[in-house]
Image (cartoon, grey):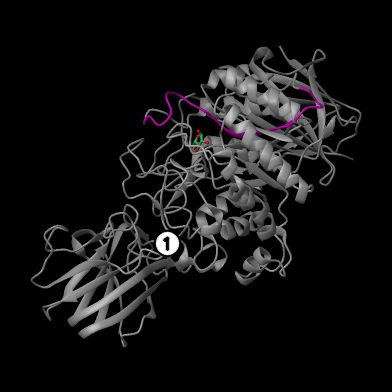
Amino acid sequence: QKTTLEVNTSNTITKIQPTMYGIFFEDINFAADGGLYAEMVKNRSFEFDDPLMGWKQPKSDRHNFNTESGIAVPVQFSKKGTNHNYCRITVKDAKGYEIINEGFRGMGIKSGAKYNLTLKASKEAGNISKIIIQFIGKDNKILGETSIVPTTSDWKEYTAQLIPNATEAKAKLRFTFEGTGTIDLDMISLFPEDTWNNRKNGLRKDLVQLLYDMKPGFLRFPGGCIVEGRTLVERYQWKKTVGQVDDREILVNRWNMEFGHKPTPDYFQSFGLGFYEYFQLSEDIGASPLPILSCGMACQFNTGELVPMDQLDPYVQDAIDLIEFANGSVDTPWGKVRANMGHPKPFNLKFIGVGNEQWGTDYIERYKVFEKAIKAKHPEITIVSGSGPFPEGDYFEYAQSELKKLNAEIIDEHYYKDPKWFRENATRYDNYDRKGPKIFAGEYAAQTVAIASPENKNSWECAFSEAAFMTGMERNAEVVHLTSYAPLFAHEEGWQWTPDMIWFNNLESFGTPNYYVQKLFANNKGTDLLAITKNGKAVTGQNDLFASAVKDVNTKEVIVKVVNTSAKAQDLNIDLKGSKFQSKGTVIMLTSPNTTDENSFASPKKISPKESEYTLKGEKASLSVPAYSVTVLKLKLK
Ligand code: AHR
């Protein structure tokens, strides 16, 4: 028996915001350092808490240095400023001495590709005549080689290029010193030449491509809890992440902890991917930048440290200055910093987030101060406020009611729940006040089991349940203005949190079924919301079906999304009232037979959209939706 759904194609309920489907970025799971940020050398400037972490001196362990042939010792030359240490190499034996950088769980190198090395060196004593730099693989097999000749006792930058003769996911970088004497080294950096847009200090191309392909409406950065820090001193301070890369001060990552895959004592933020680069990335992928700033509250899951109210000014000033950095003319102090970094044109910032996932009275009183100051100077900027980590409960209700009283513009809601919750909550926004604050569903992901457990998977059930929920967000586009899955990225061997939208190792990456759901919705968001009903009611789980419909006035299409969460295929009639259509359309289907199915490095596109031509016969579109499927039907208006 066929189910009939009706679409009213001539009546726009509301405009869909261009920001409807976006991206949440946080440097968790090695997402930035060790991931998107293409730097391959870990601890390149010897600034980690253990200044030689990531560096090995072979023929000895680190605590029993190989003093026969040479020694590497960190030197702290300054406690002030941002760059405190360098590494002093003393070579005693002309046969050579070596140090090795292990990369981020190794270095991914591709045969024939170019890798650009830069380092700063200053010759101190004796004559270290040459530094040989090699990629080494298993059993120290040499996979590529280059060298530099240090010439002076002044600090000087040297460059060289490596072209490996083999592909290896876990290469290391070895430095062998010829001659004897003492040489100081700092800022030893290695990037693939082939970065996104071929930028120096660039981003991993395959990972940006996955983001670009989503056509995201916004990019939220830099987190997540990382915004807040475990303590206020360890909060994310955007001003420390712009300007010369060498001058950006390293900070321990809030996710440097025993959580998830394995402890990650080597997780630090180099800030090579800083706020300028986030704005640039937003621009590159066509997304509206959405920075989130500390509101003077450290992560409430950690210390919950609070800045006293009479000391909040610098935090507020950071927000005001950020608007100037993004949008100010080149004649303003912060606009000038942006211009000097290479972007005289404004970044067109429209949103700013005050606090990440804060809750309670402490948040509301701080939010009020930010709101007053930002609006006084920049009424054109829309403020995003937080409502805590849970989508219900006392704290959530308190935040919602207080923020409503304050006429907050957009409230960020987070939900990490089981798949059933997502299906059952597809109606969540049906009764939200159309005149109240708008919603940013800023972090959500269905969880098969507890967060961060290796058993917590990016299963197909999670993905199609999110899709069911997303039809509910789309149907409520009048209230829901921004949405993003979280977290975004995870390194196969460096993760703290599961599930995640995109998995990668040092060479490869793949989108999960959840990624393809996000991409399908974002690529087909349309411009105008239409009603799709069954017997006059929104389709929110009847026969395990969920549906939404939009029109795209630019492409002149009507787009219907149907999610079938049942174990049975279903036949549908879609009655398209109010418009005439061309007979040829497109149907895109995302499906897999088992709820536990996943994508993997071995089978990266096992669950991925399949597109085919659709022929419309008459006024009703007939569609057969497989068990456990997400279907997008696109029909061209005549
Ligand atoms: O997405 C992972 C974490 O979940 C974020 O850092 C935080 O905002 C939330 O608790």
Residue extent of the magenta highlight: 433-454
- Looking at the picture, how far across and down is residue 262, in whole percent? 31, 39
Q: Is residue 258 above or below residue 344?
A: above
* Residue extending farthest front: 310
Residue toward you, 96 or 528: 96
Residue visible at 32% across and 65% down in the picture: 166
Image: 168 above or below 526: below
Q: Is residue 186 visible?
A: yes
Residue shown at the point (45%, 31%) measured from the top left: 301
Tell me where residue 525 sits by quadrant.
top right
Residue 152 location, quadrant:
bottom left
Please state the horizontal and vertical placement of residue 85, each as a whole percent of the image: 33, 66
Percent of width and height locating residue 105: 32, 52
Give the percent coordinates (x, y) of residue 407: 77, 31
Residue 452 is covered by the magenta coloring: yes
Farthest-out residue, left: 68
Q: Nearer the viewer, residue 256 or 20?
A: 256
Instruction: Please state the total of marks drawn on the protein image.
Output: 1
Question: Along the line of sight, which residue is nearer the eye, 153 or 590?
Answer: 153
Disc 1 residue crowd, few under 14, some 14–19, many 20+, Cα 10 Å: many
Give the position of the C terminus as an image quadrant. Answer: top right
Q: Which residue is mark 1?
A: 39
> Which is more toward the observer, 552 or 188?
188
Instruction: Look at the image and tell me in which quarter the N terminus lies.
Output: top right
Residue 631 as seen in the image, left or right of residue 257: right
The verdict on residue 123 being magenta is no
Kind of residue at disc 1: Glu
User: Is residue 378 at least partly visible in the picture?
Assistant: no
Within 8 Å: ligand 1 and the Cβ of disc 1?
A: no
Question: Which element type, helix, strand or loop, lies under badge 1?
Answer: loop
